[in-house]
Image (spheres, rainbow, N blue to C red):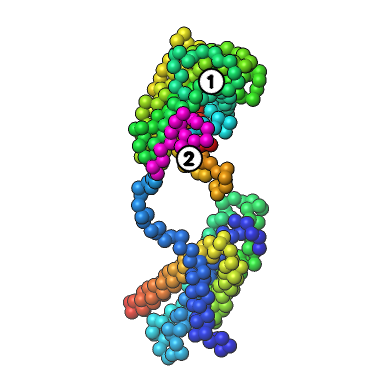
Amino acid sequence: MKLFSNKTLLALLLLLSGFGYITSCTHENDVLPAPASNAVVINRGNAVLLPGTMTKGDTTQWKLDKAHSSVLWQTNYVGLAGLLTGRFNQFGMHNVTDAEMQNYVGSGQPLMDTSWAFYENDPSKTYFSGYVQMNQANTGEPGRDGGCLLTSFGTTPIVAGTQNLTVTNIARIKTTKVEFDPLSEDYIVTLNLTWQGPLATPLTESIVGKLKYIRRATVNAGTASAYDVFGLQLTFQFNCRDYGVTSTSISDNVQIECNMNFNNK
Amino acid sequence: MGNDIITYIQKLELFGFFSGYCLIYTLIYFLKGENNSKPKLLINRLATLLPYAYALTATLYLGMFIKNISLDFSIQNFQDQFRVPFLEIWALLAVFFWIPLFNKKTVFSLIHSLVFFGFLVQEFFINMNSPVGKEAIHNYMKVFTDSLLLNLTTLALVTFTYFFLLYFGKKRKSFS
């Protein structure tokens, strides 16, 4: 220890050990600071969005942008495997009355999409109705869409140039209650789903779903062609066996997602 | 040295047994100072017992090593126990500090331990610049702390045994 005195060595060892302890300090074992609040932060605006008479050019009246909207469905194949998915090509937001349930000649939806109102901060005033044409189900497989699906849905094939809104071909929804979701910015919706399917008469069941409001925003802001858009996304599920669907290719549970986009052009 | 997990664990074991000794050694010699005139002082006695404590640590390591080999008597397992051959053989050599020829010069035990401390410091510099490396250093330092505790424990055990034997040796003499 003449060459390297004990004191020097001790100092060196302490220095290197200290360096090791400081370098290895990852603060991983530190107790995390308590959250400022465990409450869900919900910020809702005061948007009031109404269809009016859907007058073109009136920016206070909101129109359903059907070309950019969709009604999608999905269910587990044979109730066990991956998802079978599809969409409905023809749908609308109209409270279809018995008198309006008929065949219409034309390629577009014959009824105005005016059966809705959305109050962002007052869900008691919010309501909507909608419908789909069941024979317009589109899974991307023509053999299935024009074949077994029609049988499963208890409806008839598409007639070219005709919009079939008869009782056997439409499924309708109509809200009975809309309320705030206490856990998110979304809304809890209670609605009636009416569909005949393969049954002898239409069946109405009360179903609970979730409505999400996609906030109003401006497209082409700052230009002459500026316009506003917003979205409503409704999700719910129902038991297709209640409506007489017996096909074992699909699960009991069918999930529906309605993506409705609106603009004020 | 390979970089797999078994090699890493074996390095941790080696550091855990042997790297802390050098710090305890230098600390005791620092406390002892230059005064060797009072051999009965506890600190002076501790200084002379240090190699025995180190030999006890090495014996514990040898025990663990034999246990690992005895779990599976196969060539593959034997090879697996020697992932860090240089350091492992060097570690096992410390058992010879039980022999007076080797423990007479206490500084040999310091040099033996400094080899492990040197490799530990090398690991700091290899790993210090990456987040994953910092985790590795974190483990090494935990093991280094364990090593300090282990070597303090073995020193305490050896010291206790020494005074125990000394006490009963004196008693036996007084009876005879």
Residue A147 sits above or below residue A217 on the image: above
Circle 1: residue type: Pro
Q: Quadrant of the C terminus of chain B?
A: bottom left
Q: Residue at coordinates 38% horizontally, 75% vertically from top-left?
A: B163
Chain designation of label 1: A
Q: Earlier in the sequence, mark 1 or mark 2?
A: 1
| Residue matched to label 2 | A214
Q: Nearer the viewer, residue B95 or A179?
A: A179
- Which residue position is annotated with label 1? A110
Residue A149 appears in the rendering: no
Residue A46: within the magenta? yes
Q: On screen, B49 above or below A194?
A: below
Instruction: Point out residue B36 in the picture as x, y percentages from the top left corner.
Output: 44, 89
Magenta portion: prevailing SS class: loop
Q: Label 2: few (<14), some or many (≥20) within 10 Å?
A: some
| Residue in the picture at 47% in, 83% down | B29
* Residue B130 x/y as whole percent: 58, 63
Residue drawn at the location 50% of the way across and 21% of the way down = A111
Classify 10 Å Cα crowding around label 1: few (below 14), some (14-19), many (20 and above): some
Residue at image x 49%, y 14%?
A101
Q: Tell me residue A129's x, y (percent).
A: 44, 25
The quarter holding residue B9 reads bottom right
Q: Relative to the observer, which residue lies in front, B123 or A149?
A: A149
Quadrant holding the N terminus of chain B: bottom right
Q: Secondary structure at mark 1?
A: loop
Please, what is the three-letter code of the amino acid marked with disc 2?
Ile
Rendering quarter of residue B67:
bottom right
Which span is picked out in magenta? A45-61
Tag shown at residue B97 = none
